[in-house]
Image (cartoon, helix red, strand yellow):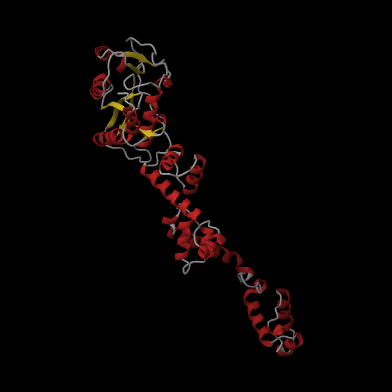
Amino acid sequence: MDVKKKYQKFDRIFKENAVKISYEKNSVKAFAEELGIRGNLIWRWRKEYENFGHGSFRGVGYDRVHPDKKEVFDLEKNVKESELRFEILKKAASYLYRGNLILYHFIKENEQNYSILKMCEVLEVGYGRYHRWKKDGISEKQQQIALLKEDLKKIFFRFNKHYGRNKLTKELQSLGYVICMRQVSFYMRELGLRRIKKRKTKITTESGHNYYIAPNVLNRNFKVQAHSQAWASDITYLPTVEGFLYLTIIIDLYDRKIIGWNLGTRLDSKNTTLPTLRMAVAGRNAGKGLIFHSDRGVQYANRAFTRLLAEYKFTRSMSRKGCSCDNAISESFFSSLKRELREGNSRLLTRKQLQAEIFEFIENWYNVKRIHTALNYKTIEQFNEEYYLKGSL
């Protein structure tokens, strides 16, 4: 038997012409012998041509559809394609943004349910790379990258999406990774990790008063040599479901610790600056010559607050008019607070709930666990431990 003849292939034009001519012949069998093919092929080709017309004989991998129904067919095909993509994405939702290795395991687990090629296409995974992984396993370098990504995600979410690439790089380096900020940025984009953005703040300073305005003694000298050489203070507003609360803080410029803070419902000094200063003095040794810096707000310029500063023998210092940069450290804290505390949650809290949130943020997070760029990426506690070890206090 001639094997080549048995498996002889015919192109689309040959088949279509053979079908058309066969209708003009008296005997399909005789016509098939004339062409040198089996008679049943003519009958099979006729049936296909009757169903699909010029859409016949497209070969393996092509859809067979009558030209008159092509538009409807394509629409139905697109709908099925979209449904399949959605089904794969929905099923793979918990695997997304976790790196290719995790996706490889998903594909392997679902090979019986979906086409491997389709899953690779939908999940944007290299088809060849998947098969190489399946055949050869995972390299040591890939294992290290996968471990790094897992640690990066843990750190990012542990700090509630507040850390950017600089602080994340320092945290990873503290774990022993040799990595630079550019690499961290790359992996953050790969994993879809985006730091929460800042929001604009509302001005609470009321400087239209007749009280004495102190000169800018601090003059932006934010780096001091020891604790209680210079303190900075400011006030901001925080919305609640019951109205605004006003947060007053005092920060020691040496270790950037919030040493005094108070939440009040009114902007007078009894609800803002006075209790905050008393808390700061009670918690940290301070004496004559300490520079107390603030803006020109009436809460800082009024007689009651001025007398208290004089009682403690502090030196008054005030920002220049309309120059928020003169009190940049306090402004920076409020920026961090409003970004890190409740950003991404539009739900307003009650005053009692906000009080608890502020306490948690300042006392258990900012003053204890948060690393600070100004402290060479150390926490305040780590920075002060080194200070005490040096015998400076």
Give the position of the N terminus as an image quadrant.
Answer: bottom right
Residue nearest the viewer, comparing 85 with 331: 331
Q: Is residue 65 above or below residue 340?
A: below
Give how far across and how far down residue 49 sits, in percent.
66, 77
Residue found farthest to the right: 34
Q: Quadrant of residue 358?
A: top left
Q: Quadrant of residue 269?
A: top left
Residue 68: % across, % down: 62, 68
Q: x%, y% of residue 210?
A: 33, 9
Quadrant that contains the C terminus: top left
Q: Nearer the viewer, residue 126 or 147?
A: 147
In this view, 163 is above or below 230: below
The residue at the point 38 percent across, 41 percent down is 344
- Say whether residue 81 is visible: no
Determine which quarter of the picture holds residue 252: top left
Q: Residue 226, percent across and down?
A: 34, 22
Would residue 175 be seen by someone viewing this image from the given angle?
Answer: yes
With respect to residue 344, does 77 lie above or below? below
Query: In the image, what residue occupies the spot 41% across and 29% down?
Result: 374
Q: Is residue 251 left or right of residue 138?
A: left
Classify residue 257 as left or right of residue 105: left
Left of 260 or right of it: where is 296?
A: right
Query: Which of the two residues, 212 or 137, is positioned nearer the viewer here?
Result: 137
